[in-house]
Image: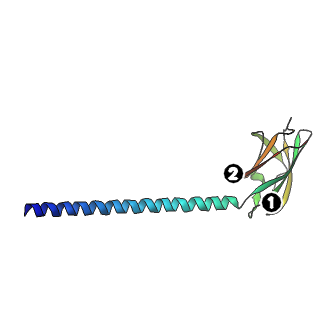
Amino acid sequence: MKLIIAILILAIVFMAECTQQQSQSKDNIEQISENASKTIHETTESMKARVSIESAINNQNVIKVGIRNTGSDDIFLEKIKAYVNEETKGIEGNIGILNPGQVAMFNVTDATNSCNKIIKIVLSSGLEDSRIIMC
């Protein structure tokens, strides 16, 4: 009789442990699924704003840059950043909104000795494009 009671107690403990493990696994799967959905949403949203450098021409230490919005969302021009060989540069004339398909022109300043170097334009979403500066 004691053996049967001991076996029943072990069975109850075992079932309780299995139920707890199953509940934790379900919570973990739900968390992973939620994180994956969030990442997919953020990636999709960030790809709606895309930029392409159409031209980058050096003219007396000022680079005249033309960019095109190749995405499906507006680009807020005051939020873009410019780099020449990974150094942050100033931007003049970048105000307003660049609608999908439109081109905007602006100047990248303080671009001494920038001929044949790389210019990179970075959107607030982190997406970027780069091109060799023509002289």
Looking at numbered disc 2 in the image, what kind of residue is underneath it? Gly
135 vs 119, left or right, is: right
Q: Residue at x 17, y 61 (%)?
A: 9
Q: Residue 3 location in percent, x, y? A: 10, 61
Q: Residue at x 37, y 59 (%)?
A: 24
Q: Of the residues tagged 1 and 2, which is closer to the observer?
A: 2
Q: Residue 126 location in percent, x, y? A: 69, 51
Element type where label 1 sits in the image = strand
Q: How is the image coloured?
A: rainbow
Instruction: State which quarter of the image contains the N terminus.
Output: bottom left
Q: Dot 2: within a 10 Å radius of its alpha carbon, few (fewer than 14), some, or many (20 or more) residues?
A: few
Looking at numbered disc 1 in the image, what kind of residue is underneath it? Leu
Front residue of 14/50: it is 14
Name above or below for residue 91 compared with residue 39. above
* Contact, mark 1 vs mark 2 (Cβ under 8 Å): no
Front residue of 106/20: it is 20
Q: Residue 94 location in percent, x, y? A: 82, 52
Residue 98's tag is 1
Q: Quadrant of residue 62?
A: top right
The residue that disc 2 covers is 126
Element type where label 2 sits in the image = loop
Q: Residue at x 76, y 58 (%)?
A: 75
Q: CA distance from mark 1 to mark 2?
A: 17 Å
Instruction: State which quarter of the image contains the C terminus.
Output: top right
Q: Residue 79 location in percent, x, y? A: 74, 52
108 vs 73, left or right, is: right
Residue 43's tag is none
Q: Residue at x 82, y 39 (%)?
A: 117
In primary-sequence order, the first of circles 1 and 2 is 1
Front residue of 45/135: it is 135
